[in-house]
Amino acid sequence: MSNITVCARFRPLSSKERRDHGDAVCIQCVDSETFIFKDEKAEEFTFNFDRVFYEKSEQTDVYRFLAQPIVQDALNAVNGTIITFGQTGAGKTYSMEGPGILECHAVEKGLLPRVVEEIFECTKFADETSKYTIKLSMVEIYMEKVRDLFDLSKDNIQIKESKTQGIMLNGVIEMPVKDPPEALLTLSNGIANRAVGETQMNIASSRSHCIYIFTIQQESTKDKRARTGKLNLVDLAGSEKVEKTGAEGRVLEEAKTINKSLSALGNVINALTCGPTGRGNHIPYRDSKLTRILQDALGGNSRTALLCCCSPSPTNSSESLSTLRFGARAKHIKTSPRVANEDKSIRELENFTPIKRESREKLLNELQESLDMEHVQILEQLFIQNGILFDPCSIEEPELAYEDVTSQTISSLQLALEELLSTNVELMKENVGLKARVSAAELHHEPISKSSLLVSISCHLSLFRDWFKSLFHSPPNHYT
Ligand SMILES: Nc1ncnc2c1ncn2[C@@H]1O[C@H](COP(=O)(O)OP(=O)(O)OP(=O)(O)O)[C@@H](O)[C@H]1O
């Protein structure tokens, strides 16, 4: 088990930030791992990350620390994921791509072109018994749909899980690339297909999460055994307060969808780092496409790094603080990267699958025995009405659908439980108030009016009724 690597990066102040606040910044460097952050109320927070990149840090520093070890591992068939996270305009795309993927000053090249160079450089000098094949895929998650950026007609790619290869994108195009120029041209074609909108925060704001997937297959010419490493580079859409972006209409809907999937990511991180360990802890990976795709990176077989991009300006301090808190929490996630060796995977499959399958079947049988058919049908109707269960006709694999439904139901119930707990706290407070009123009235020998007691009780009841209703009228969770 190893922790994911989490770094923070502060970009230089923008000209607008300089106009608003001059040279003021909300961070004070302590060393290369620690800094003090001052929020709007001048409260100080000390943050500690694996590495902090301040405004003078160069692209090569970020690459060497954050990405190079993961690329080296991917060349040895260990899966890797590098994620950029932060508010709109914080420097995610600059870190990932640089100012331009095809042409830019060498020092400004982002992670992506550097990854391409390193992969081909290493494969060129690999020993003669190894033959490498590099393939590229590019998808974006736009409005909760996964689109293939190499073939826009594939605009609703399904996410599948394989016992041997983990999370997979069904039917996604994999472009073979033979050298860096071809790889960069392929990537730039994909980037041109990304959904970009304009917000007040950033005029070329990415309105989607973009995932660059490098599949690196290594075949031994001696014994023909092949092993594959997958490297995902994830440029997340901006996390910002909707009001600050000045978004309306479609852009507002986009912002809400982005925020929803980023909250789902936050919930997954919370569940991975706060919940009880072991089988009882439900990790809501299936609550959004983003978390489902990142499932292996966050909780499975992947070496993962997160770059938290921030503005250093006091103008954006509340957004920067939430980005940094997100990173601080993610630092506690543990993953178990291992070599994706095909033979070993098959052996693992032979060893473990029958046990898992047997226990799942046992569970299903027990469930069927303990519930009447009539109850199962009522539950099914209820779930369909509330958008928890999707149309069974659209499901290709019932087993996957069953897992999705179970997972989403658990999430809904957890939400309901949280609401119930908070209603309970409110009711308890009210109860204390009522008791105090009764005691005060008794002390002063004042009769408490029946009507005021009735109002309080009906207040209690309506709170409870609202909660109960909300259980069955939560917005539908579309999941196709
Ligand atoms: N480290 C940096 N050095 C110099 N300029 C930077 C740096 N980081 C970001 N910038 C500049 O800041 C602006 C916003 O950066 P960028 O587009 O990368 O933000 P973003 O986080 O990807 O935003 P969005 O979520 O809207 O896509 C760009 O003009 C970019 O060139």
Image: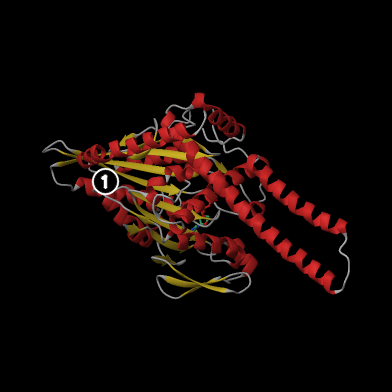
Mark yes or no: residue 248 visible: no
Residue at left offset 70%, top offset 63%: 429
Q: Is residue 198 above or below residue 89?
A: above
Residue wearing tag 1 = 120
What x and y, as percent, mark residue 437?
80, 67
Extreme top residue here? 393
Q: Secondary structure at mark 1?
A: helix
State the residue at coordinates (46%, 29%).
Answer: 154
Instruction: Find residue 71 and report its horizontal and vertical position in percent.
Output: 30, 51
Compared across the picture, whether 261 is left or right of 296 comes to right
Kindly indicate the quadrant of the structure image that contains residue 390: top right
Q: Quadrant of the N terminus?
A: bottom left
| Front-most of residues 79 and 181 | 79
Q: Amino acid at mark 1?
A: Phe
> Of residues 476 and 76, which is closer to you in this image?
476
Q: Nearer the viewer, residue 275 or 75?
A: 275
Question: Is residue 72 shown above or below 31?
Answer: above
The image shows residue 333 at horizontal and vertical percentages of: 40, 57
Please tell me how many numbered marks the rendered image carries.
Answer: 1
